[in-house]
Amino acid sequence: MAIINSLERRRVIPNWRDFKSTIENGELQCQTNKSYKISNADKLLKEKIDDFLNSPTIGVAADLVSSAYILDLQDDPIVDKAIKVISENQNISSLSLKDLSEKIRPSKSTNLTNDDQNLSIVPSDDEYIFLLRKRIAIWKNSLSNQPINPIGWVEISRLYSLLGQKIPSERAMRIALALDPNNRFIIRSAVRFFIHYDMAEEAYFYLRRAESLKFDPWLMSTEIATSCILDRRPKFIKESLSLIESKNFSDFSLTELLSSIGTLEFYEGSLKKSKELFRKSLIAPNDNSLAQIEWISKEDRSFQFETQNIKIKNPQEANAIKSFEESNWNQTLYYSDRWLSDIPYSTRPVLLGSFVAETFLNDNEKAIELCKRGLIANPNDIMLKNNLICSYAISGKINDAVSMLEKLKPEIQDLPEDNKIVLQATMGLVLFRLGEFENGRDLYMKAYQNAKNIKNDYLKCMAILHLAKEEINARTDQIDKTFEIVQKEAANSLDNDVKELFKKVKNNYLKLKE
């Protein structure tokens, strides 16, 4: 059976976009209120200025300009000199570096270019991969001229990650961190990289090492989210609350921090505090904090906020979650597709979109397309392969389903229990489609019973509902018996997708009985 997404809790981990998009989202500017100045900001910038004065190369200029932008100290005349070095070396300057210079000192006619502008509209996986490799080649050429540009190394790390190539991606990210361990863009990108590859300890190490952690709300938020993933108590809750209460930062600069603390309070049972923090995070949200609100609202229906008229950049994830909760399947698929284009390394939009396409829209070709795209960046992800197997089996590509399932079998033993249950049900589906109804039924019932054993009501309902779907499709003599269990287990579920699938199964059952 297809699975909707990872059953883990959502945390406010930074989204990893290209440098230009991150600038446009406003996540790199300091955005302080009044005349407040970040502690140590002058010292940090002076170090970059001294480096530039000692070595006025384009790589050092890039480091100075990005730091000046993040620290909101762009008026120093040396920053102008660094921008001049960049403008005088257009032939070896990266697009993101030119864009940042333009952001600080706009010229009369400049076309800012998004490094990801074509990736969402490519017609095929082959062309998508070709464009990624072409971008890598361009960045390699740029870095050969400016090897100490840390932002360039982050960009190339991201591109390798989109190709599912962990080793060169990790190498590039570690170089960036060595060059500038205090840069917000670099640290937040690195955290997302390490968490993406199940290396949360590494993410935490680099976060705690950053001097800017103690005064940067964007990094404080990231520290809280990373600590929670590691099941640790965050170190800077008190400092974070003081920073919020100081009124020294804009509402937008605090949105992820408020959301992270709100999530922590939610899972610790302090619902009143959590609601107030989430309410404040919605004053000026970004895509991450808005998506977190939609996720929490799905987890606890008493957490309902008015989000209808909120306008933000990149609302795809929030809209996908909201559409799913409203049972608007076409919209869910649409926004999942857009979400994947925005965050191509994430498995969550693929799992959500392929689940909805296969389960509610009967669009298995779209589900297959999404899974194949997701597997480019995540070639070893078991649940993506699971959903692909399901769509292969249901669409009649049974040989492809069997071949992929056989390759997965050696890995099943080491999986978490909930993933084993999902794959047991998927093996049941494949056997049903092969005409081996009894063996398929046994595996579905094994998945159902194992879900009961670990007290996972969601998987228990899904396993028996998918068995009922297959019994009805195959017109077996066990339809009535299976539907009795469905009525008992799934009729009163609070999970939206379970309720909707129950309606679908019930309607098909009643039609069969007419």
Image (spheres, rainbow, N blue to C red):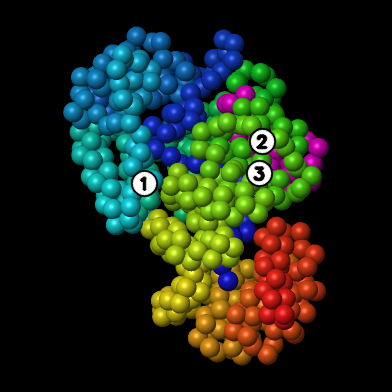
Q: Residue at x 62, y 24 (%)?
A: 251
Kind of residue at badge 3: Glu
CA separation, marks 2 and 1? 28 Å
Looking at the picture, tell me which residue is in the foreground, 179 or 313.
Answer: 313
Q: Residue at x 59, y 84 (%)?
A: 474
Q: Disc 2 marks which residue?
A: 307
Q: Disc 1 marks which residue?
A: 121
Report the side of 305 relative to 171 (left or right).
right
Kind of residue at badge 2: Thr
Looking at the picture, tell me which residue is in the foreground, 274 or 330.
Answer: 330
Dot 2, crowdedness within 10 Å: few (<14), some or many (≥20)? few
Check residue 70 for magenta coloring: no
Q: Disc 2 or 1, which lies upstream in sequence?
A: 1
> Over which residues does the magenta segment extend?
251-273
Tag of residue 315: none
Q: Residue at x 33, y 55 (%)?
A: 124
Q: Quadrant of the C terminus?
A: bottom right
Q: Is residue 398 visible?
A: yes
Whether pointer 3 and pointer 2 mark residues with C-beta atoms closer than 8 Å, the reply is yes
Task: Provide the secondary structure element on which disc 3 rests.
Answer: helix
Kind of residue at badge 1: Ile
Q: Disc 3 or 2, which lies upstream in sequence?
A: 3
Q: Disc 3 marks which residue?
A: 294
Q: Disc 1 or 3, which lies upstream in sequence?
A: 1
